[in-house]
Image (cartoon, rainbow, N blue to C red):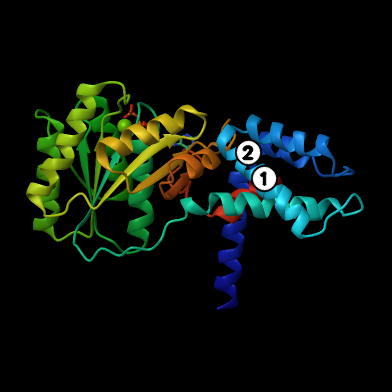
């Protein structure tokens, strides 16, 4: 048993390592503001600058600063307080600010559970679907993938490759529109008694209104194959997008009613603070984060781990 626990902890550390590696730049800013500092206005200015530089946006930054000031007072910190105490305040306040993004367990009893995945071009939708299939299959779930990106033939092929890698079936059509594929896929999922149906969609900008309408149609049509489907609608956002991510979340949420986000590429140049902005301006639970291109580079969102990856270990 302790062997399993030890392995679990080692894996957790490895995963946190990927995230920390990705957020190195932000941590270099945020982490540098603690050592040997006086708790004066200049310190608060530096915290503000570090948060803004990390893409937290002005709303979230101001609120976080107010919270940090209050917490500094509540903990009676002063100029003699150790750097770790300041770091702990900032880490705790960031964790709290991220809490609206924590997923609350809602078990739908519906089988199959239908998950529709959307997002702008190149955000990481198809890759995330491949990773999700891997994760859920490892939990013993029976999965079916739907190649709802009928825009490019290469997109269909890409999903089929992920299907082969995971040894799960992919429903696709060489002709036909995305709504037809989605309908087919949900129907097949019901007929085959699978646990989860994952539907890919073509990338689109929220400003391409006709494509947003098409996405709404894809959603509507699924309900004709299975009542209440899709049960989950997840937006994939590239963690390196910066403040534009907020506009994406708002637009896709308004169009589809999102139930979750997947934030990808947090291993790259992402600054991470955009999650603070999302938590403040349009809190949609972060179901998973992507920390690399490989099949296992997907992890559940952990607000505390994320805060520590931003601020540095205490
Ligand atoms: N470093 C890194 N790369 C990622 C991650 N997720 C996806 N990618 C890469 O991002 C690129 C685009 O990924 P796709 O999954 O094709 O993105 P998509 O949203 O399906 O793209 P379209 O279908 O063209 O809109 C690929 O090169 C992926 O390997 C991640 O978490 N980290
Ligand atoms: Mg794709």
Q: Nearer the viewer, residue 140 or 98?
A: 98
Task: Give the crowd class for mark 1: few <14, some 14-19, many >=20 residues within 10 Å.
Answer: some
Q: Is residue 300 visible?
A: no
As drawn, 255 above or below 111: above
Q: Would residue 98 appear left or right of 30 to someone viewing this image?
A: left
Answer yes or no: do the residues labelled 2 and 1 have beta carbons within 8 Å?
Answer: yes
Separation (CA) of disc 2 from disc 1 = 6 Å
Dot 1: what SS? helix
Percent of width and height locating residue 241? 49, 28
User: Residue, x 62% and y 38% (percent of image)?
Assistant: 61
Say which quarter of the image contains residue 233: top left
Q: Quadrant of ligand 2?
A: top left
Percent of width and height locating residue 23? 63, 39
User: Residue, x 58% and y 58% (percent of image)?
Assistant: 12
Q: Quadrant of the N terminus?
A: bottom right
Q: Quadrant of the C terminus?
A: bottom right
Q: Would residue 213 appear left or right of 62 to someone viewing this image?
A: left
Percent of width and height locating residue 124? 39, 35
Q: Would residue 18 appear left or right of 261 to someone viewing this image?
A: right
Q: Is residue 177 visible?
A: yes
Disc 2 target residue: 62
Q: Nearer the viewer, residue 262 or 184?
A: 262
Disc 1 target residue: 66
As drawn, 187 above or below 294: below
User: Residue, x 42% and y 56% (percent of image)?
Assistant: 103
Task: Give the crowd class for mark 2: few <14, some 14-19, many >=20 residues within 10 Å.
Answer: some
């Amino acid at each position: 048993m302790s062997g399993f626990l030890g392995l679990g902890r080692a894996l957790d550390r490895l995963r946190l390592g990927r995230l920390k590696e990705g957020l190195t730049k932000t941590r270099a800013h945020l982490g540098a503001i603690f050592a040997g500092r006086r708790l004066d206005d200049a310190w608060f200015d530096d915290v503000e600058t570090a948060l803004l530089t990390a893409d937290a946006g002005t709303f979230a930054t101001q609120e976080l600063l107010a919270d940090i000031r209050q917490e500094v007072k509540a903990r009676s910190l002063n100029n003699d307080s150790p750097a770790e105490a300041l770091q702990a305040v900032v880490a705790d306040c960031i964790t709290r600010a991220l809490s609206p993004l924590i997923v609350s367990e809602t078990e739908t009893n519906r089988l199959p559970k239908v998950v529709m995945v959307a997002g702008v071009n190149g955000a990481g939708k198809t890759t995330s679907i491949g990773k999700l299939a891997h994760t859920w299959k490892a939990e013993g779930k029976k999965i079916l993938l739907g190649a709802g990106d009928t825009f490019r033939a290469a997109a269909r092929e890409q999903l089929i490759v992920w299907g082969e890698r995971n040894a799960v079936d992919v429903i696709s059509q060489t002709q036909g529109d995305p709504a037809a594929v989605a309908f087919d896929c949900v129907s097949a999922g019901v007929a085959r008694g699978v646990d989860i149906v994952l539907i890919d969609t073509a990338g689109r900008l929220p400003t391409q209104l006709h494509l947003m309408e098409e996405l709404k149609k894809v959603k509507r049509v699924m309900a004709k194959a299975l009542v209440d489907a899709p049960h989950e609608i997840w937006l994939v956002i590239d963690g390196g997008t910066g403040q534009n991510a907020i506009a994406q979340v708002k637009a896709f949420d308004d169009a589809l009613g999102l139930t979750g986000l997947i934030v990808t590429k947090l291993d790259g140049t992402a600054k991470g603070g955009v999650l603070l902005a999302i938590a403040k301006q349009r809190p949609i639970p972060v179901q998973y984060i992507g920390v690399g291109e490989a099949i296992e580079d997907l992890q559940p969102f952990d607000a505390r781990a994320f805060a520590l990856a931003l601020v540095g270990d205490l």
